């Protein structure tokens, strides 16, 4: 559950960057509960893209094209297709980063739901961490990490249906290992 009304509440978001057509905000407000504060920041980014929302959404749904928008994802495997309809897809996937300097590669077990809301309403892709070690136990060479929330919204720009208003909300959870130490978080 995510309190989507929080996405447009300007008073809870602090602008941290506005560059090259991408605006980034941060909040510690707990948008999953809709009240209180979170220990880790939630990041919101917004940009206008020169493609229609359907094309941006199709990119998100195509695992073979993940490298076109996510430099950190080095490996990706769909483990279970939970439900697929004409307008939605729900799946469980495993993905991994490469190594970051001396740090081991990170891997993630994620529940992903992609939804077509219609051309006028747009599209969404929502992902969150799941703990299902019986389906995908931790693997050698990786540190299991968590994505608490990743929500991407692709809507047509009013009056410009061939452009996409792209909004992404992200909250990273535990990165695992030394990356979660007090020293690494400073």
Image (cartoon, rainbow, N blue to C red):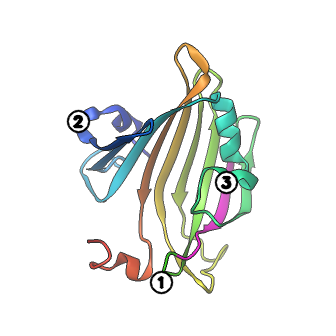
Q: Quadrant of residue 3?
A: top left
Q: Viewer-nearest of labels 1 and 3?
A: 1
Residue 88 visible in image? no
Left or right, residue 25 beside residue 89: left
Q: Residue 127, percent across and down?
A: 55, 53
Q: Which mark is residue 102?
A: 1
Extreme residue toward the top, this view: 159
Specify the segment rendered in magenta.
Answer: 89-99
- Mark positioned earlier in the residue sequence (1 or 2): 2
Q: Residue 62, percent across and down?
A: 73, 48
Q: In this figure, which residue is indicated by the disc labeled 2?
A: 11
What is the secondary structure assignment of the residue under circle 3? helix
Extreme residue toward the front, this view: 20
Q: For the residues marked 3 and 2, what is the alpha-carbon distance in whole angstroms?
A: 33 Å
What is the secondary structure assignment of the residue under circle 1? loop
Q: Residue 186, percent across and down?
A: 26, 71
Left or right, residue 133 beside residue 101: right
Q: For the residues marked 1 and 2, what is the alpha-carbon distance in whole angstroms?
A: 39 Å
Label 2 CA crowd tier, 10 Å (few <14, some 14–19, many 20+): few
Q: From the viewer's side, name the closer residue of 144 and 186.
A: 186
Label 3 CA crowd tier, 10 Å (few <14, some 14–19, many 20+): some
* Main secondary structure of the magenta stretch: strand
Q: In this figure, which residue is indicated by the disc labeled 3?
A: 66
What is the secondary structure assignment of the residue under circle 2? helix
Q: Are marks 1 and 3 in contact (CB under 8 Å)?
A: no
Q: Are marks 3 and 2 in contact (CB under 8 Å)?
A: no
- Residue 92 falls inside the magenta stretch: yes
Q: From the viewer's side, name the closer residue of 50 and 104.
A: 50
Q: From the viewer's side, name the closer residue of 39 and 82.
A: 39
Q: Residue 54, percent across and down?
A: 68, 31
| Residue under the point 76% across and 35% down | 86
Residue 59 visible in image? yes
């Amino acid at each position: 559950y995510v309190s989507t009304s929080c996405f447009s509440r300007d008073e809870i978001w602090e602008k941290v960057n506005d560059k090259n057509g991408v605006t980034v905000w941060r909040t510690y407000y707990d948008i999953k509960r809709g009240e209180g504060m979170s220990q880790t920041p939630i990041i919101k980014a917004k940009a206008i893209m020169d493609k229609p929302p359907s094309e941006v959404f199709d990119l998100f749904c195509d695992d073979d094209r993940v490298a076109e928008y996510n430099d950190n994802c080095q490996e990706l495997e769909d483990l279970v297709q939970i439900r697929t309809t004409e307008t939605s897809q729900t799946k469980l996937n495993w993905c991994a980063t490469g190594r970051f300097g001396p740090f081991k590669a990170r891997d993630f077990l994620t529940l992903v739901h992609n939804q077509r809301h219609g051309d006028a309403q747009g599209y969404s892709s929502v992902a969150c961490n799941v703990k299902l070690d019986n389906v995908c136990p931790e693997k050698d060479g990786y540190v299991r990490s968590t994505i608490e929330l990743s929500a991407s919204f692709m809507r047509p720009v009013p009056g410009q249906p061939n452009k996409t208003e792209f909004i992404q909300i992200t909250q990273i959870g535990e990165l695992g290992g030394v990356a979660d130490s007090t020293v690494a978080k400073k």
